[in-house]
């Protein structure tokens, strides 16, 4: 029989995606099943935690079976089970965790609790076999905006240093809030990405908040107020508000800040490799800007395909593989944690 490599089943339920995946040797996704609950939550304008948990519970067994079927893998061929342990919605995480624990116990397989953000960072390993640490990662998601120096893949604090993080809203959160102000619905990121293409950022200029000299932290909470003020000022003057211009102006502001901080972090660490990760990394304008900047600075850039940027379980299986290879496993007392430091 052909060698199937080391097979990790990944499970991810930290927000509104119920996801499972089988990854071979940490790099090849044999399946990547994602059941999105967006349609359930969009009527509320955002994710409703209890509804998310209930849907995860309904969907999880079918999603895991689909991931195994798509990969043509039997349950007992799995070498270990990796699952998101946090951060995220605790009731949602618990559904994935309970499923992973039950499978690990029943099959007698190791269990690996993965930090969701470490998972996002590892997403770039899936399609890029040549990517190896050390590298700098810019993580931009709905809950996080961080610059992380990665020296190894054990997932432990000894091999990761957070160089800067948002002090208030995450980049994705800013996208979602501004989309709500513009009446574009949830989730806002992809909608702003789409309409900004027809806008002129020069018509809606917002402040680039860079914080103190040398700081690699971010602050995006003022941007929503800036957008609201812009809209109100226009309306009071009886002038029309072009949504596409607001979207383009807002997006250019976020991208300028992300790009400037990333350049500063690359200069500070001397790293020559950059990984873009998290849901906002699916943004077309951010991807293009990072590509141009990397060309200019001679940095090797690795960006996952959009499906591996937003929440998925392949990234969790991939991270789990490297943790397992470093000897990291958990016992069945593994707990979910809503706010988990990297
Ligand atoms: O990583 P993710 O799927 O979930 C979290 O871990 O938070 O990120 C979700 C975030 C949302 O705020 C969503 O609006 C944003 O990623 N997002 C985007 C795009 N696609 C998703 N933001 C900008 N442009 C996009 N194309
Ligand atoms: Zn995420």
Image (spheres, rainbow, N blue to C red):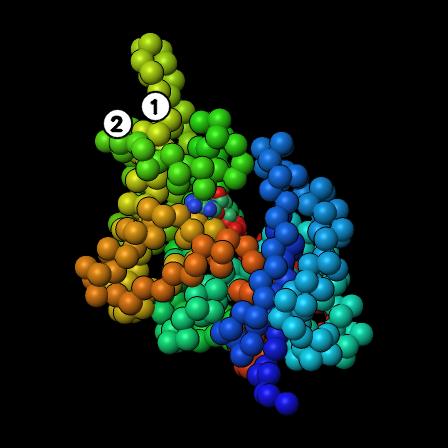
Query: Residue sitting at 38 percent across and 73 percent down?
Result: 131
Is the C-beta separation of discs 2 and 1 under 8 Å?
A: yes
Cβ of disc 1 within 8 Å of ligand 1?
no
Among the 4 quarters of the image, the one containing residue 292: bottom left
User: Where does the image place residue 67, in percent across and percent down from the top left?
Assistant: 65, 65
Query: Which residue occupies the extreme bottom position in the image?
Result: 1
Q: Residue at x 72, y 47 (%)?
A: 55
Q: Quadrant of residue 246?
A: top left
Which quadrant of the view contains residue 150? bottom left
Give the mark nearest the N terminus, 2 or 1: 2
Q: Residue at x 39, y 40 (%)?
A: 193
Q: Secondary structure at mark 1?
A: loop
Q: From this viewpoint, is residue 147 visible?
A: no
Question: Do we see residue 139 in this rendering?
Answer: yes
Q: Quadrant of the N terminus?
A: bottom right
Q: Tag count in the figure? A: 2
Give above or below for 209 relative to 77: above
- Residue toward you, 102 or 70: 70
Q: CA distance from mark 2 to mark 1?
A: 9 Å
Numbered disc in front, either 2 or 1: 1
Report x, y in % for residue 276: 39, 59
Q: According to the image, label 2 marks what residue?
A: 203
Which residue is painted at 69% across and 59% down in the image? 63
Q: Which residue is mark 1?
A: 242
């Amino acid at each position: 029989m052909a060698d199937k490599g080391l097979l990790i089943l990944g499970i991810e339920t930290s927000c509104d995606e119920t996801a499972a995946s089988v990854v071979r040797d940490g790099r090849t996704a044999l399946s990547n099943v994602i059941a999105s609950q967006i349609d359930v939550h969009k009527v509320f304008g955002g994710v409703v935690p209890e509804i998310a948990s209930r849907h995860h519970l309904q969907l999880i067994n079918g999603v895991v079976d689909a991931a195994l079927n798509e990969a043509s893998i039997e349950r007992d061929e799995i070498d270990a089970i990796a699952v998101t342990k946090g951060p995220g919605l605790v009731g949602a995480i618990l559904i994935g965790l309970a499923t992973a624990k039950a499978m690990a116990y029943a099959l007698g397989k190791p269990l690996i609790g993965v930090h969701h953000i470490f998972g996002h960072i590892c997403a770039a390993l899936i399609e890029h076999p040549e990517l190896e640490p050390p590298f700098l990662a810019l993580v931009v998601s709905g809950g996080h905006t961080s610059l992380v120096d990665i020296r190894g893949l054990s997932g432990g604090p000894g091999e990761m240093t957070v160089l800067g993080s948002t002090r208030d809203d995450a980049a994705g959160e800013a996208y979602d809030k501004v989309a709500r102000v513009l009446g574009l619905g949830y989730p806002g990121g992809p909608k702003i990405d789409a309409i900004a293409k027809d806008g002129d950022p020069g018509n809606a200029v917002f402040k680039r908040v860079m914080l103190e000299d040398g700081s690699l932290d971010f602050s995006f909470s003022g941007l929503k107020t800036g957008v609201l003020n812009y809209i109100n000022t226009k309306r009071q003057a009886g002038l029309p508000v072009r949504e596409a211009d607001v979207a383009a102006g807002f997006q250019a502001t976020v991208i300028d800040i992300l790009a400037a901080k990333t350049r500063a972090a690359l200069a500070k660490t001397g790293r020559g490799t950059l990984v873009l990760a998290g849901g906002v990394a699916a943004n077309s304008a951010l991807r293009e800007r990072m590509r141009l900047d990397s060309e200019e600075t001679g940095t090797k850039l690795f960006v996952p395909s959009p499906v591996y940027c937003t929440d998925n379980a392949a990234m969790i299986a991939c991270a789990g593989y490297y943790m397992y290879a470093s000897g990291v496993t958990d016992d069945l007392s593994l707990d979910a944690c809503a706010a988990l430091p990297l």
